[in-house]
Image (cartoon, rainbow, N blue to C red):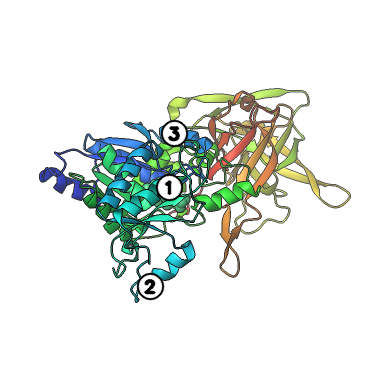
Amino acid sequence: NEQNSSNFIHNIIDKDIENQTYGGRVYTRFPPEPNGYLHIGHAKSICLNFTTAQKYNGKCNLRFDDTNPVKEDTEYVESIEADVRWLGFEWDKLLFASDYFDKMYECAVNLIKKGKAFVCDLSADEIRQHRGTLTEPGKESPYRNRSVEENLTLFENMRNGRYGDGEKVLRAKIDMSSPNINMRDPVIYRIAHAEHHNTGDKWCIYPMYDYAHPIEDAIEGITHSICTLEFEDHRPLYDWVLRELEWEAPPQQIEFARLNLTNTVMSKRYLKALVDNGDVDGWDDPRMPTIAGLRRRGYTPEAIRDFCERIGVSKANSLVDIALLEHCIREDLKSKVETRMVVKDPLKVVITNYPEGITEEVEIENSKEDESRGTRKVTFSRELYVERDDFMEVPEKKYFRLFPGNEVRFKGAYFITCQEVVKDAEGNVVELQCTYDPETRSGSGFEGRKVKGTIHWVDANAAVKIKVRDYNYLMIDDEKGETIINPESMKEYEAFAEPSMAAVKPGERLQFFRHGYYIADEKLSADAEKVFNQIVDLKSSWKK
Ligand code: ATP
Ligand code: MG
Ligand code: MG
């Protein structure tokens, strides 16, 4: 159970509760920047923050960290809310960091008054040059010793739009010789004459993440501010901001290792480029590692939560095999969905000893895993389709499917023997002439002989045409070991399905017998021909 498991963060919280650090309260937040759609990495953070709050009867906010006006958009805000809900979580409060801009400004004025912040006229390049390196201390800015009065005036002028972008910044006055470069008078406010999705053009100065984030947490009464490992070096600055602003019982930042997955790029910037370049069909393309993409692909919230639970939470970066995610969706679907027969790459079969103009119905179980799902009737007649690769003219060793002279079981119907191969002028196989043995009808109790292969089929006269999209990883490594976009990440088939599939609704999931799990695409399935996305194949490469 996801709420009962423990990790190093829960150990810290247990101690805080024991010591009454926050009066026994536990309050977390998930703080996305609305500059793209959420991905499976964010799901790890969402699950961690929300289930941690649940475990301690605490609360968790959804807070949009929207302090950067340029890249943010309400489309992203809406998608993020939908994705968090879809994963199965409900926030205590829905908040925007930009709603705290007044308070943040006030805090900056306080820092200036305490002599802890100054307005600096150095350019971004000059600031970088002054910053020093890991082995060399930084150089102090010539503007560092401006008087409090001058700083207050200049900061107000910054706010009032008197300067252009980049002309001035507000910097914290900490320590240019600190071994931690983040503490060398970091910039805490910058000028950006840009329209903000929430505050419009009210502001032309915007706070930097390292300054804004601790204030956001403190305003909301967050107790444990969980973030990824790359912020570990920023923690002293997080603590500095709250200490200088004299916050009582300040929140504490705790870092964990971000999720990295094989064959998966998880940078919003990169994913946005894929969308903008048209490499994929939008943020919800079924090949995308976004929550929206996984949803359209047919993943369930249960499978994603199970995955996040299994990967655990640690302090050490690692790479998780995507096969584990695939294992989780197979586990979730195997007893939840029914099975149907679909022929992706059809080859015609004519049963020469079966009467013309006759159709019979055979009964096939809906689920191997769950008998209570009963059976359905499937029509069988003289002309059928089978999968092209269920036939080999010259069989390989251990090939037990159709080849001249061989007998196989047609799932739920009869034993069928391949007799003749019909070819076109170019020598391509276009039809198999077969015979059936009426005595072998499925369910008749026939025990006369056994066959090794069972294959699926559809009745040619009753079949429903569908499109089937099989997927491969979007990102692969080329021969040189460089990650590239897989040129063969999708393969579309004009397939034939058994008649019952005419009634499948968008969003419905099925197992295609011998193929894998599929979902009727929610966007495209209103079309005359339904489109099915492959969720995952049947075989598991995952080894426990
Ligand atoms: P990206 O690098 O994809 O832009 P980000 O960290 O900048 O991601 P945010 O919107 O700031 O994106 O992320 C919100 C929260 O999700 C942060 O607390 C961040 O640490 C967490 N997060 C982002 N990516 C991952 C990941 N791969 N694994 C775990 N948590 C993540
Ligand atoms: Mg971020
Ligand atoms: Mg980012």
Q: Amino acid at mark 3?
A: Glu
* Label 3, label 1: how far apart the Cα atoms are: 37 Å
Whether residue 488 appears in this view of the structure is: yes
Q: For this view, does 343 lie left or right of residue 383?
A: left
The residue wearing badge 1 is 157
The residue wearing badge 2 is 133
* Label 1, label 2: how far apart the Cα atoms are: 32 Å
Q: Is residue 505 above or below residue 118?
A: above
Q: Amino acid at mark 2?
A: Thr
Residue 351 on image: x %, y %: 74, 35
Sequence-earlier tag: 3 or 1 = 3
Question: Under tag 1, what secondary structure?
Answer: helix
Sequence-earlier tag: 2 or 3 = 3
Question: Under tag 3, what secondary structure?
Answer: helix
Q: Nearer the viewer, mark 2 or mark 3?
A: 2
Circle 1 Cα neighbour tier, 10 Å, few/some/many (<14 / 14–19 / ≥20): few
The residue wearing badge 3 is 81
Q: Amino acid at mark 1?
A: Asn
Residue 317 on image: x %, y %: 36, 60
